[in-house]
Image (cartoon, rainbow, N blue to C red):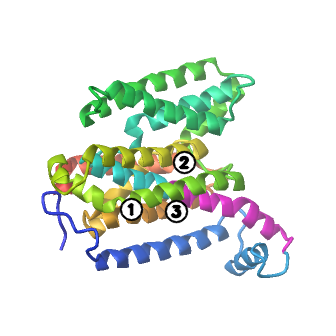
Amino acid sequence: MRRTIGQPPLGPDEPIHSGSRWLATLAFAVLAGSLASLTIGAYRISIADVFQVLASHLGLAATDTSLASAVVWNLRVPRVMMAVFVGAALASSGAVFQASFRNPLVEPYILGVSSGAAFGAALGMVVPRFPLSVQLAAFVGALAAVGLVHLLARSRGDAPIVTLVLSGLIVGSMFAAGVSGLKYLANEAALRDIVFWLMGGFYFATWQDVAITGPVVAAAAAVMIGGGWTLNVLSMGDQEAETLGIDPRRSRRVLLATATMATAVSVSAVGIVPWVGLMVPHAVRLLVGPDNRVVVPGAALMGALLLLACDTAARSLTASEIPVGIITALAGGPFLAYLVRQRTAGFFG
């Protein structure tokens, strides 16, 4: 039976059999989609060759020095893994934000993550001899924006949700203005780099990106998935949470900080990929209901599958690659219009 926000939450040990079947299906789809994505591109490679390349690099077969090996292992595998990590991070973070704020239209970007990261990245591209790399500057910018939002929102040791959202809009506007100023000052090459970064994409994904992003996303996902039952309780309101022995402020702070960290490291690595954190959690709820013990891991898997599909389309539909952010934005606009038309409160009971 599907529960809504007003009903008692599922117990932390109560079984979720139907949700488990959906999660298994999504996990299989992500695995199959990853393998399919490795075969698709300007240079077509058969699935048998893909398995041969993977086996050779994992030490299960003789060393493969073919062109297919270089394309698959050096270019496509890091790209596919980054699509999976970033999609999982953005979608699961969106599910955490929506449940924590009890608002179906929020996602991590409302705290200024994207605008702060954009300003940091633009600064790294425009300023000669900037001490930080573009990716590190974007990460620092994202965290600085979130820190400023919390500083503005805090009142007597607390940060009310409405004030937090309004502070996010203010800080986001400030950093967006800073990006516009840097674009005005940039030379032609830097301006082109800024524009491409703002559109988001996996064109430059490397094994170093995987090594940095993967562990952070995995750790954050473990915390967010482990907090599924806590999110169920928080969705009932702070008073109900306190009666069940949960400190709502502390729990919400930990979960939101974790979601923000996952988003910041993802955005710093690939640029701005909009709407994933908004669309995917709703799609998962339509499939499995509002139980966050299933919604959060389901969103992570579906987000990974969505960005895999978007990235595969981005590099195979045309001769020149389409930024992934454009594809997700094209899907996100109509989806938001659909949510507004359906009276958003209905998605939470």
- Looking at the rendering, the stretch of residues picked out in magenta corresponds to 64-86
Query: Closer to the camera: disc 2 or disc 1?
Result: 1
Q: Earlier in the sequence, mark 2 or mark 3?
A: 2
Element carrying mark 3: helix
Q: Amino acid at mark 3?
A: Ala
* Foreground residue among 43 and 226: 226
Q: Which mark is residue 226?
A: 1
Q: Main secondary structure of the magenta part?
A: helix
**Residue shown at 65%/21% (left/top)?**
186
Among the 4 quarters of the image, the one containing residue 125 = top right
Give the alpha-carbon distance from disc 1 to disc 3, as whole Å. Answer: 27 Å
Element carrying mark 1: helix
Q: Which mark is residue 266?
A: 2
Residue tagged by mark 3?
309
Asked if the magenta segment contains residue 72, the reply would be: yes
Give the alpha-carbon distance from disc 2 to disc 3, as whole Å. Answer: 18 Å
Give the total number of marks visible in the rendering.
3
Q: Amino acid at mark 2?
A: Ser
Q: Amino acid at mark 1?
A: Gly
Question: Where does residue 107 sit, x and y in percent of width and height?
Answer: 37, 45
Question: Where does residue 192 sit, x and y in percent of width and height?
Answer: 65, 32
Give the alpha-carbon distance from disc 2 to disc 1, as whole Å. Answer: 20 Å
Asked if the magenta segment contains residue 186, the reply would be: no
Whether residue 317 is visible to the viewer of this picture, yes or no, is: no
**Residue shown at 32%/74% (left/top)?**
19
